[in-house]
Amino acid sequence: MRALGASAPSSETPLVLVGRAGRKRAILAANTTALTQGIAPGMAVAKAQALIPGLVVQDTDPQGDAAALERLAVWAFKRYSPVVAADPPDGLRLDMAGAAHLLGGEPAFLSDISRRLADSGTAARIAIAPTYGAAHGLARFGRSPALVQPGDLAASLAPLPIAALRLDAAVIDGLRRLGVETIGELAALPRASLALRFGPEVGRRLDQAYGRVSEPFELVEAPELVRVRRAFAEPIGAPETLARYTGKLVVQLCEELERQGLGARRLDLLFTCVDNRIEAIRAGTARPLRDVKRMTRLLCDKIETIAPGFGIELMTLTASIAEPLSYRNASSLIEPATPDLSDLVDTLANRMAHGRLYRCAPFPSEVPERSVQRVEPLAPPLGVTWPADWPRPARLLDPPAPVEAMALLPDHPPASFTWGGVRRRVKRADGPERIFGEWWVRDGELSAVRDYFQVEDEVGERFWLFRRGDGEDPNTGNHRWYLHGIFA
């Protein structure tokens, strides 16, 4: 986590971080290059420097590392989950139960967070498991990335070393002297004798890893976010009671948002249970919003996903994303109001995975498959219009389907073509419409050409065919034919 600045050595340079371990200066962490050359945490600095002459030594910065981990936790909170906590010295804990579906599921989350961390230059080991104890051990001692389903929890934990249970070093050393190396071997031993010899810590860590007891943790909180809370003297759990207090929290949140001139783009509602579990609801909006009725409905639609257990003692509502919002006239006598679709968009978007709700908009490109892009449902117009010179089919094939065609070169339409095993005779045709490659997108398109034809077969079906190349110069294309679209 330590930032080394602009003069940081390359990844091929052996690098270690050193600090005090008792009375000596010892290595606390090392990069991959140093580890492969024989360096190990706990080794004396003098021994390491004698082993690798060009070793780069940096002092540890615990305060800086903690601050960097906190910033990373806030980023994960805003991007992925309303339930995030720092796991010092080098980990994050995310509860994806209330937000995984918004990202397209757990595999999509693994892919997305791995890519984003790699793009930022942060190496990470990631695991998703039913319990935090299991995820902690798998991320540090198992294969990464790992995705464990509830039915596979015991089998996934069994081969991990006992160090994955976060036990004290003295306890780990004592267990190893008894011949216990893995969690599976430890779980098979009698609990009473373990507690008598090593205390209650071993049993507690086993229960946390297997999900028999919950594990409290302190959530990360960004101080700049608008947040309201409601604590209860007696735990509550009935769905109608949760919905009623959700409405009251929304009223308080909207009052605070109005004082700050903000509107909520994303809402996080957390339920803290008496058994230290945290249940969460996350809802997003297409536009900044301060409408009590709509916000309450978006949250209450997901109340049924909350499992209160023995009861809920605290509810926290946060506007995790907020943007400036001011009042404006909805209509006038001169110009009528435009329909507001944001309510419908919000309802649909919160029932689908992230990115599933969109609209198509034109994009400034002559290449047909690039002339359309996905945008947010309520995104403003881009100022780009559809090509007006030639009509486009209602359905484009992705990728274009290769066909066998008979045509005179260089610029005649096909007399017939075979697609899907069916030979179609062309009765009418229009074209060619020549489209050139975009050299600024790919170097290989510098001289590429496509000639498009609109053709109609003998039964009246209309197709959009193109030939790669201009019909004369082989450098412009291989002169093969493709079906790219079907007209309605």
Image (cartoon, rainbow, N blue to C red):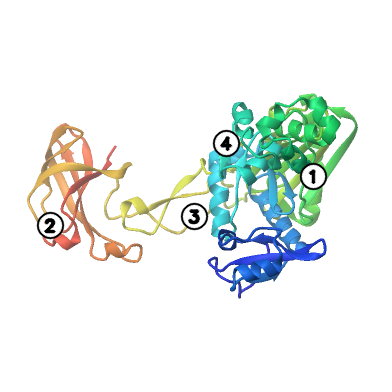
In front: 333, or 272? 272
Q: Residue at 73% across / 61% down in the picture?
A: 65
Name the residue that disc number 1 marks: 170
Which image quarter: residue 153?
A: top right
The disc label shown at residue 381, or none = 3
Residue 143 appears in view = yes
Q: How many marks?
A: 4
- Between label 4 and label 1, give the one nearer the viewer: 1
Q: What amino acid is found at the position of numbered circle 4 in the picture? A: Leu
What residue does disc 2 label? 471
Q: Give me the disc on residue 348.
A: 4
Q: Residues within 10 Å of mark 2 (few under 14, many from 20)?
A: many
Q: Nearer the viewer, mark 4 or mark 2?
A: 2
Question: Which badge, 2 or 1, is on the more N-terminal residue?
Answer: 1
* Nearer-the-camera pick, 454 or 204: 204
Q: Which mark is residue 16?
A: none
Image quarter in which the N terminus is found: bottom right
Disc 3, disc 4: CB below 8 Å?
A: no
